[in-house]
Image: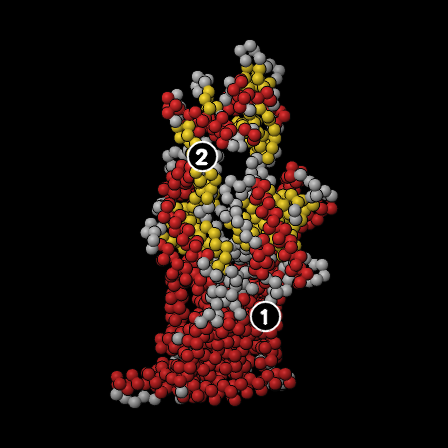
Amino acid sequence: MRGFINYFIKYPIAANLLMFGLLIMGGLSLLQMKSTFFPETPSRNIFIQVIYPGASPEEVEEGIVDKIEENLKGLTGVERYTSVSSENSGTITVEVLKGYDTDIILQDVKNEVDRVSSFPTGMEPPVIYKQEQLGRAISFALTGQGVNLGALKTAARQVEDELLAIEGISKVEMSGFPDEEIEIAFREADLQAYGLTFQEAAEAVRRTNVDITGGTVKGLNEELLLRARNKEYYADGLKDIVIKTTPTGGTVRLSQVATVRDRWADQPNRGFLDGMPSVRIDVQNTLEEDMLSITDKVKEYLENFNAENATIQAKVISDASITLRQRMATLQENGIMGFIIVAVLLAVFLHWRLAFWVALSIPISFAGMFIVASALDVTLNVISLFGMIIVIGILVDDGIVIGENIYSYHEKGLPRTKAALNGTVDVLGAVFAAILTTVIAFSSFFFIDGRLGDIFREMAIVVIFSLIFSLVEGAIILPTHIAHSKALDKDVKPNKVQRSFDWLMNFLRDTLYAPVLAWTMRFKFLTLSICVAVLFLSIGLVGGGFVLTTVFPTIERDEVDITVQLPAGSPESRTMEILDRIEAASQRVNERMSDELFGDGRSLVTRIEKALGPTTYQGSLEVALLPGEERGDIDVRTVQNAIREEVGVVEEAEILSYGGNSFFGKPVSVSLVGNNIEELEKATADMKAELEQMAELTDVVDSNQEGLREINISLKDKARYLGLDLQDIVGQVRSAFFGAEAQRLQRGEDEVRVWLRYGEDSRRSLADLNNMRIRLADGSQFPVSEIVNLEPQRGVIAINHTNGMREVKVEADIATNAVSVTDINATVAEEIIPAVLANYPGVTTVPDGQVRDQMKTSASLMIVLPVVLGLMFFVVALTFRSAGQAAILFSLLPFGLIGVILGHWLMGKPISMFSGLGMIALVGVIVNDGLVFIATYNDNIRGGMPMMDALNDAGRSRFRPILLTTLTTFAGLAPLLLETSRQAQFLIPMAISVAFGLLASTLVLLLLLPALIVLLNRSRVGIKRITTGKKYEYHEVEPAYRELGEDGIDHDKPIGISKVES
């Protein structure tokens, strides 16, 4: 290695070529990196979707879902499977374990579904697919005053086609309108008059409305294709279809017995924007597409669209690129500001030319990192940029160590090149070990389970490869530049600013630190006791509620999401009345708060989007606010609570929740599972009642909502006498009231179904059902009321399963941010859940929501952290060749909590999982500084210094670089810590842990570490005296002293490097 480094110092052209090569290739790689909001995470979800028209949730569960789930049991590589059975459909979600190939598991799942022996008649084939990772790039709505839904849909289809024709856009989704269908509505009297059944009419439509070929006629001169072109695609073309002939030769056409019309399906899928009907269009980006590029193209298209269309206008609802650009700009500004502050600090504490070469390690290291990151498909996102901000201060640390060591060798009289070589090689081992320990610390992010592990993987890549390239830069490029620059010139005098800071640094070191260092070395037990006491007092701040804790930080949003659910079966008109009431209340709140906040006519609310569906009794509103930076101290929860108060109590609403799910789910989520349905329902009611009693919680809801009223059909004796069975009767009832599907027609891009059923006026009441005629094989007819019993009962909206067992989820939001989510969840887990389940032995709970993610992350950390700390300990012990010194260094790690806790207290932020990840990053920095401190102490021992002098000199000599490392790292993060924009809020807890944890750790490192070294030394002396009976000098028991030969020279060091020789 010495010869390798010497080659670059001797031939600086090689170092410069390496530097420019890294910068050029890194720049090109940076240009090729895509921009995304969050890191692109691998898909680990597989969906099985089934459609069973007209079926109840119970029918879907028993006939389909239960059968599939039975085959999924024990499938290798599956973490869990959940399902939702609802009216007409069911969805099973299979979650794949981390480390397994999702494509292989997908094939296994398909095989298990194929093994199901039978599915109900009328069910469509299951659709099985892997979740595609898509990001919502931009959403907009088409709307116009007085424009009907049909015109909006036609325009939306045109927009969809034109957007898909633009290069780089491949995913466009539309919503806000029901499916189109053709309804053939029969009248019971006409069916009876002509002796028709639904099945006969449907078959007539299928046979007549066709477009088929009949082969070819091969003549002598030409070949003729035989074809029947008789397919009609609209209602008017179907009216003249002959469905029956009379004995007299007459014909009965469809229009004689039914009303045929084109219509929207009975699906309450409607959208409204600021009170006008609208169609929503979402443009998404795949993993291969660049979000910023897509949004720019869409906005350019919409600008032209609005210019060319007067009646229908496109209004952007959400634009992810705005938030992404804001967050990236915020982080870039913070990063640049941090870099400038770091460079200024280096310039004032070091010679400015030396500081320049040290600071140059930042762009060189980043350039090398970009090369690798681009190859590993890392994107430019808020997490990767944050990793760059964190590592800025760490990158210059090793440059400071090497640069100062080269400077000190040159001060002793060595020539430039010799000083550069010896100064680099002298500390390279410690620098390598320091970087390796930091790399090991950040490598733990690769093995964290849960969504946090997926998100922070890219940050680990950024930090690790930046550090690796900083080692290359520090070992090869930096010494070359220092050796051949004017940074070592004797005639260069520091300027006034540098002299002032030199005086300040010397004052801090010699006047303040040196006496305190001597005191801590003398009163070592008292020093240790004080540090431990401060640590426990800091922990007490958390226990006493002065510092709040939460699972995941609250990420401020710019929307209030309101969800409404009325009793199942409520008409569409009533749901719309409630939605209109909430919309009006939101507008009143907006007027009042806008006047208070601005008073100049500006509006706090930018838009109100209203949607009806997916059922007639469900709906939602999204109240969009001005960006956080433009609305002062008004946060989303304040607006949310104001709207809740303005709306008041809606007695008939089964669910009325304000707010929405965060990225990590609801703060409080309890999943109750069990196959005893009665116990499960009672446990759900008790759990919900307990959570509603907690003042800290609001919007407590459960997933076990009552469904539509059902009419249970059972046979009377007369039906059995007539030879009828339930299948015959229910089949005819289903055709009349739900409908019999005759055909599916492809009308452009829409698949249009042709339904035969009673008209709306003939299927509105139980009387209509009672009067319906059931037809027998001999043509006789009997009213429903004569052959079956009709018993009303209540079903459920949806049936949830977890791993094959019935599940009911109870969720709640926090009423205010001034509560500890961790404490609330602890109360729920330790007090409420045991009390509820004690009464229901057939019911258990499974983790869900934020708690489940926390448990997954914590469980993986329990495995990863001991391994990571063990590897770091191994590296440090191998470097020191002393397990004792490694042990006292690692004993400092818990004291980093002092800064972490106090930092969150000072900044008014709760401690979260993000804070914990910051602590992991902090470990690498602490070990880095401590390693070089102890390495300097060992070098002093090898140099022949007495033990206390060696330790005192190590503290004084390492004071400057350790303080510089702390200041540069803190300075790099300071702009982010002071950032008030919402774009940076979710990253601040992690930055607090690193920045404030490092401040506290620096004091502990400079004061407690020397005391611990003295304690360890005295322990060794005592043990030696007891075991050998001899008296030892303090320095004689140190590992570094034992490595010396009889001549007092460390033979493990290169000749000419030992301090004894110099």
Question: Residue 34: horizontal and vertical position, in percent?
Answer: 58, 55
Q: Is 792 in front, or is 595?
A: 792
* Point 63% across, 43% down: residue: 279
Picture disc at residue 613: none
SS at mark 1?
A: loop
Kind of residue at disc 1 = Leu
* Point 51% across, 40% down: residue: 569
Residue 220 in view (yes/no)? yes
Q: Is 212 in front, or is 735?
A: 735
| Residue 522 falls left or right of residue 210 | left
Q: Is 202 in front, or is 951?
A: 202
Q: Which residue is mark 2?
A: 711
Image height of 438 relative to 403, above or below: above
* Point 53% across, 11% down: residue: 247
The quarter of the picture where residue 180 lies is: top right
| Residue 541 falls left or right of residue 620 | left
Q: Nearer the viewer, mark 1 or mark 2?
A: 2
The tag earlier along the polypeptide, 1 or 2, is: 2
Picture disc at residue 978: 1
* Point 64% across, 85% down: residue: 496
SS at mark 2?
A: strand
Image height of 256 relative to 906, above or below: above
Kind of residue at disc 2 = Ile
